[in-house]
Image (cartoon, rainbow, N blue to C red):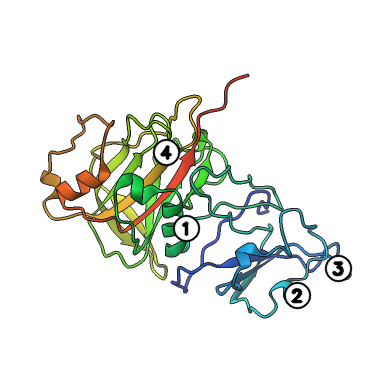
Amino acid sequence: MVSTMEPPSFTVIGMAQTKPFVIIAADPDTPTPQTRYLVSEFFALNPSPPEGIDNQTLVIDATSLQDFNISAHYGSHTPVLCEMSATIARPTPRLGHGSPEASPYKKGVGLVASQDLNLNVVKRAFEDASIPANLAIKFNPSALLEVTFPESTGKDVTLHAGIQLPRNSTAGPPTFSAIGDIGNGPFLIATVDPDAPTPQAPTSAQIRHFLAPNFFANGRPFTPVQSLDNGTAAISEFLQPTPPAGSDAHRYIFLLFKQPRGFNDQTLVTPATPIQLFNISTFAVATGLGDPIAGTFMLVAPDPPVA
C-alpha cells in the first residue's frame, strides 16, 4: 500500500512553460461515493490561474475543508491534467527578506514548499530582499535554478526564492538543476551570505558558502529540467548556514553563472582563500563570469536556544 501521510511532489511532463500553476486537491466521494457531499482528494492542474488569484479570499487556511466546490471557484479555468492522489496542497507564498517564516506543512490542509516556477516572481523576490543592490549585481534571470537539500527524514526540500528553513534542514550539500534553455555548460555556482555576522552590521560579509566551477547540464528526456553535475572539486565546498545566536535570519543566495573559457586558470580565489569578505560582483567581473543567469535564495535563522 502506498503511504499518503507525507506531502506529495509534483512533476509535469510535456509543458515547458514557467508561468504559475494552481494545483487543487479534492475528493468527490467523501464520506462515501454514494453521498458525495464533501470534498478533498483529486488533483487538477491549471496552467492559467485567474488574475489576482494570490489575493483571493474565498479559500484560505482557515476555510473549512468540507463543502468545497471546485467548479464554483475555478469553473471557467479548465484543468489540463487530472489524476487521483491524496493530499490537499497549494503553493507556499513567496517570502521577502525579513518576512516571517512560512507556515509548516499541515497534513491535509496547509502549505507545501515548492521550487521556483516563474522568472518574474524570482526576480521580484530578489528585488524585495534587496539582493541585487546588496551584492552589486544585475539580476535578470533567463532560467530557473533549483536547489534541493537532502533530508535525513521526510521529503527533500527544494527551495523557492525567499523560503525560510530551519538550520537543521540545510546540512547539505545540496543538488542543483536548472529549468530553461541554458545550453550544456560549463557553469559556476556560487553561494554567499551578505548578512554576516548580522544583517544590521554585516562586517564579515560576504561569506562564501559555496563556489564550484565545471557544472554541466544533463538533460532528461521530455522534461525541461536539466540536472547540473560536476566532476571536479569545488573551490569552496558547501558550508552549512550557521548564523550566530541573537541574529536575525540571514539570506543565503545561490547564483548560477555561465563559465568563461580559461576560468579554471584563475587564482583570485583558491581553496586557501578566506571565505570572509568575499565579493561576488568583484569576482565575477575579474574572472569574466558576467551576470548570473539564474538564482534563488533562502532565509536561515539561528538555532533556537536550548531550554
Callout 3: SS: loop
Identify which residue, 276 or 171, lies in the foreground: 276
Label 2 – label 3 distance at C-alpha: 14 Å
Label 4 – label 1 distance at C-alpha: 19 Å
Residue 207: give x, y in percent of width and height.
32, 34
Callout 4: SS: loop
Residue at the location (37% across, 51% down)? 176
Mark sitting earlier along the chain (2/1):
2
Identify which residue, 79 or 120, lies in the foreground: 120
The residue indicated by pointer 3 is: 37
Q: Nearer the viewer, mark 4 or mark 1?
A: 1
Q: Is residue 193 left or right of residue 60?
A: left
The residue indicated by pointer 1 is: 116
Label 1 – label 3 distance at C-alpha: 35 Å
Amino acid at the residue labelled 3: Tyr
Mark sitting earlier along the chain (4/1):
1
Q: Are marks 2 and 4 in contact (CB under 8 Å)?
A: no
Mark sitting earlier along the chain (2/3):
3
User: Is residue 306 in view from this perspective?
Assistant: yes
Residue 64: give x, y in percent of width and height.
80, 57
Mark 2: give few (<14), some (14-19) or many (20+) Cα within 10 Å: few
Q: Are marks 4 and 1 in contact (CB under 8 Å)?
A: no
Residue at the location (27% across, 65% down)? 183
Mark sitting earlier along the chain (2/4):
2
Residue 89: give x, y in percent of width and height.
65, 58
Q: Nearer the viewer, mark 2 or mark 3?
A: 2
Question: Which quadrant of the view contains residue 272?
Answer: top left
The residue indicated by pointer 2 is: 72
Residue 172 is labelled as 4
